[in-house]
Image (spheres, helix red, strand yellow):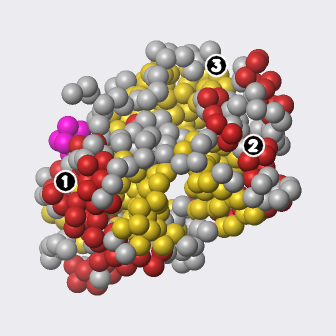
């Protein structure tokens, strides 16, 4: 299972890429493999303020709807509109074209509570 | 996302190790640890619609009923008319409670002049058997054989040719049942299913299950046969509007409300729940199970979403999901009779947003004519 070194991970299988004071969030390769067949992604509205660990998006597979939690607190600045036409991008490129939203970090040290790649890889075994 | 629940206290079928070996994703279903998919639900769904798929249905229950009074007993506890069956024939039927509500839906086969074979839902085995035992009258022998059998449902357009070659004989006609002494065991083949495709459900001694499963998969390769999980089983049956007990049926729901009046015979004499069912058939039930499909792009509808008509909440969804064949969300809901009319515009409230849908006729999916 692919677990990129440069990302931070939530226990709930979201990843966070930090660039300056902005973060990009998606779900991990492990998560998309568990869900398979993603058919709908409900993205948040730009401007939404969100607390860490709060529900921010919904990923729907054929089988079930799964809540996506924001790994950190912040304000949503951009959402991946390409998922509207092609939600399967989350399956095919979970760490790239399948990103879900970007947010302005409320706290530059916010990611300190998240897992690094090694810890996340150990968690998913 | 949340991790799926753990597998404690779940029962396993004789084919469990085969599923693990095949890399299946496992889930809890009706108290059983079952494969939800091997590759993907959509892929397995299309395999059944276009070629053939095999499902482990060993979790389902089997009960044998025999004796001189078995026919009268079954006519008193089931809604359909068991006397219509000749040996080798089966029928879909309902096990009702005193209020006409559904304890379980099942298929009853006549296997001899005084012998019957019931195939019941996995989650209901203990309850069904306890109910049937408590209602037994006269010279009737009832045996719960649920642990004795492995079950394989082979479904899809290629399945009949595949199975007739595999079993070395002709399958019985639709709803029929026949035994095949073949491949070192006895395989009971019933021409039934839960997908809307032709095929058969095979029941065989549990100990032979893994071997026959593997022989069948090997034999079926050239027919396009693949193992399929409960995820595809659910999308296939929902496209056909076949109800799932626990989602679409329950003790507070009658077969008349569920649109299963065809399987309730009011002319066969008295049976449990008959009064309520006769009244509903004559006067109409207050609500009816209505299939619907989403009329615009939306998340797939799931269970327990509010259903609105004319801006008012009129019910909630029971089964729902994405139809891989249609590419849209579909579902079923109990709705007032005036709303449960094909063509009626409704709305489904999905996480606080209303999405347009339309009441449809069943089945929601019809095979294109070749």
Instruction: Please name which of the two marks, 1 or 3, marks the residue nearer to the observer.
Output: 1
In the displayed structure image, the side of residue A20 where residue B78 appears, left or right: right
- The residue at the point 36 percent across, 42 percent down is B198
Question: Which residue occupies the foreground of this view, A106 or B320?
Answer: B320
Disc 1 and disc 2: Cα gap in Å? Answer: 41 Å
**The residue tagged with tag 2: helix, strand or loop?**
helix
Question: Which residue occupies the foreground of this view, A120 or B154?
Answer: B154
The magenta region covers: A80-86
- The residue at the point 62 percent across, 54 percent down is B112
Chain under callout 1: B
Q: Which mark is residue B223?
A: 1
Measured from the top left, where is residue A70 in percent x and y? 35, 59
- What residue is pinned by disc 3? B337
Label located before the other in sequence (1 or 3)? 1
**The residue tagged with tag 1: helix, strand or loop?**
helix
B37 versus B8 height, above or below: above
Label located before the other in sequence (1 or 2)? 2
A13 versus B201 height, above or below: below
Q: Is residue B73 visible?
A: yes
- What residue is pinned by disc 2? B75
Q: Residues within 10 Å of mark 3 (few under 14, many from 20)?
A: some
**The residue tagged with tag 3: helix, strand or loop?**
loop
Q: Confirm whether circles 2 and 3 share one chain.
A: yes
Residue A49: within the magenta? no
Measured from the top left, where is residue B363 in percent x and y? 43, 29
Question: Which residue occupies the foreground of this view, B107 or A19?
Answer: B107
Measured from the top left, where is residue B72 in percent x and y? 78, 46
Chain under callout 3: B
Q: Quadrant of residue B98?
A: top right
B310 versus A63 height, above or below: above
């Amino acid at each position: 299972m692919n677990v990129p070194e440069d990302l931070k991970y939530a226990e709930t299988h979201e990843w966070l890429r930090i660039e300056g004071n902005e973060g990009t969030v998606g779900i991990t390769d492990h998560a998309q493999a568990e869900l398979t067949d993603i058919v709908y992604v409900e993205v948040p509205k730009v401007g939404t303020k969100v607390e860490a660990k709060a529900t921010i998006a919904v990923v729907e597979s054929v089988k079930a709807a799964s809540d996506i939690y924001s790994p950190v607190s912040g304000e949503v600045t951009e959402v991946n509109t390409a998922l509207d036409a092609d939600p399967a991008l989350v399956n095919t490129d979970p760490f790239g074209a399948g990103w879900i939203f970007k947010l302005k970090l409320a706290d530059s040290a916010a990611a300190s509570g998240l897992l690094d790649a090694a810890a996340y890889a150990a968690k998913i075994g | 996302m949340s991790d799926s629940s753990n597998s404690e206290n779940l029962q396993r079928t004789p084919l469990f190790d085969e599923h693990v070996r095949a890399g299946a994703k496992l889930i809890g279903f009706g108290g059983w640890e079952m494969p939800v998919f091997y590759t993907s639900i959509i892929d397995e769904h299309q395999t059944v619609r276009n070629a053939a798929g095999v499902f482990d249905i060993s979790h389902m229950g089997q009960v044998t009923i025999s004796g001189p009074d078995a026919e009268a007993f079954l006519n008193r506890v089931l809604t359909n008319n068991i006397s219509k069956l000749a040996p080798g024939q089966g029928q879909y039927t309902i096990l009702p409670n005193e209020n006409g509500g559904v304890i379980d839906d099942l298929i009853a086969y006549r296997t001899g002049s005084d012998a019957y074979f019931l195939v019941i839902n996995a989650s209901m085995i203990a309850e069904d058997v306890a109910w049937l035992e408590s209602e037994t009258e006269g010279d009737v022998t009832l045996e719960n054989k649920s642990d004795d059998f492995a079950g394989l449902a082979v479904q899809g357009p290629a399945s009949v040719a595949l199975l007739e070659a595999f079993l070395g004989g002709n399958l019985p006609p639709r709803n029929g049942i026949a035994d095949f002494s073949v491949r070192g065991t006895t395989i009971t083949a019933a021409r039934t299913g839960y997908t809307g495709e032709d095929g058969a459900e095979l029941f065989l001694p549990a100990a032979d299950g893994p071997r026959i499963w593997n022989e069948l998969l090997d034999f079926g390769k050239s027919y396009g046969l693949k193992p399929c999980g409960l995820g595809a089983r659910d999308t296939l049956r929902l496209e056909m509007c076949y109800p799932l007990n626990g989602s679409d049926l329950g003790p507070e729901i009658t077969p008349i409300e569920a649109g299963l009046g065809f399987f309730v015979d009011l002319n066969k004499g008295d049976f449990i729940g008959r009064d309520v069912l006769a009244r509903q058939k004559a006067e109409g039930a207050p609500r009816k199970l209505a299939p619907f499909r989403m009329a615009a792009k939306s998340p797939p509808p799931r269970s327990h979403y509010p259903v609105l008509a004319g801006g008012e909440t009129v019910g909630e969804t029971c089964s729902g999901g994405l139809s891989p064949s249609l590419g849209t969300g579909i579902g079923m809901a109990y709705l007032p009779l005036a709303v449960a009319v094909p063509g009626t515009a409704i709305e489904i409230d999905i996480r606080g947003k209303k999405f347009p849908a339309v009441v449809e006729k069943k089945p929601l999916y019809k095979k294109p004519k070749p």
